[in-house]
Amino acid sequence: MLIKLINPNTTVSMTEVLRDAASAVASPGTEILASTSRSGAVSIEGHYDEAMSIVGLVDEIMEEPAADAYIIACFGDPGLLAAREITAAPVIGIAEAAMHAATFVATGFSVVTTLDRTRIIAEHLVRNYGMQHHCRRVRSTNVPVLELDRPDSNSRSIILAECQAALDEDKSGAIVLGCAGMADLVRFLEDRLQVPVIDGVAAAVKFAEALVGMGLKTSKRGDLAYPLVKPYAGKLASYAPRARPST
Ligand code: 5HY
């Protein structure tokens, strides 16, 4: 099975972290094709960055129509429902994957993310995904996304301290990592915290394998049907939905 893992930001070194995290959990028959968006922000840290990332995400999906599943490897899950409209293959966002995984291993979890503005975006996701019952709190660390990549930054210890505060103050039983760039912190944190620490990239790979294994595809009835065929104007003219042979 072929899973296309898309980093919707344009930082190639982050994609390498994501590829390693995905490959570490992929089953022997699963090929992970990790790609970096070619348009948009170097890091996605706000609503505008997210909105602007969606064209690059669509390009990556359209370029690999034969993939069995797609993963959007950014914790805001930018463009998730739009992506589900343009393909019938399962599309999984890492935030939804991580939150769902956490509900299987703890009655309550905390999300530990990067900037404070990202915290607010993650809180929206908690509500959108109906996770209020499970998510005890979303916490920010004020570590910018690209700091996670710098060997000389003290981001690891800052994130560890915030996770410890989540366990002590929120009484959470598990930690959800609120940024794709934290994927390589799982072992470091689990060893010290002794609770499940969930990286959405790994969770998304396992859920993608499960959905494909069950033969489940995205429903094409209702709002996730292929986009209506119509002209688009201006810079986005070439993105106008086209008629499909089967529809
Ligand atoms: C992410 N931004 O996972 C996020 C989420 C964050 O470029 N990849 C990004 O921390 O803002």
Image (cartoon, rainbow, N blue to C red):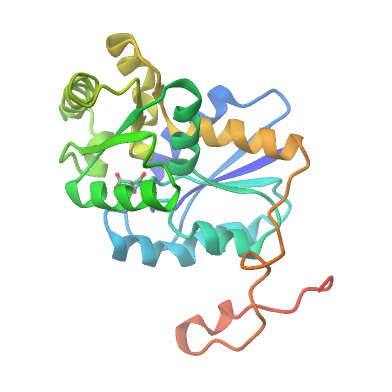
- Across and down, in percent, residue 157 comes to 17, 22
Image quarter of the N terminus: top right
- Whether residue 62 sits left or right of residue 45 in the image: it is right
**Which of the 4 image quarters holds residue 242?**
bottom right
- Across and down, in percent, residue 231 comes to 60, 89
**Which of the 4 image quarters holds residue 42?**
bottom left
- Across and down, in percent, residue 175 comes to 34, 26
Q: Across the whole image, how many numbered discs are drawn on residues?
A: 0
Closer to the camera, 128 or 97? 128
* Image height of 168 relative to 96, above or below: above
- What residue is drawn where x is 42% and y is 22%? 106
- What residue is drawn where x is 43% and y is 56%? 78
Closer to the camera, 160 or 129? 129
* Image height of 74 relative to 137, above or below: below
* Image height of 38 relative to 115, above or below: below
- Across and down, in percent, residue 222 comes to 66, 67
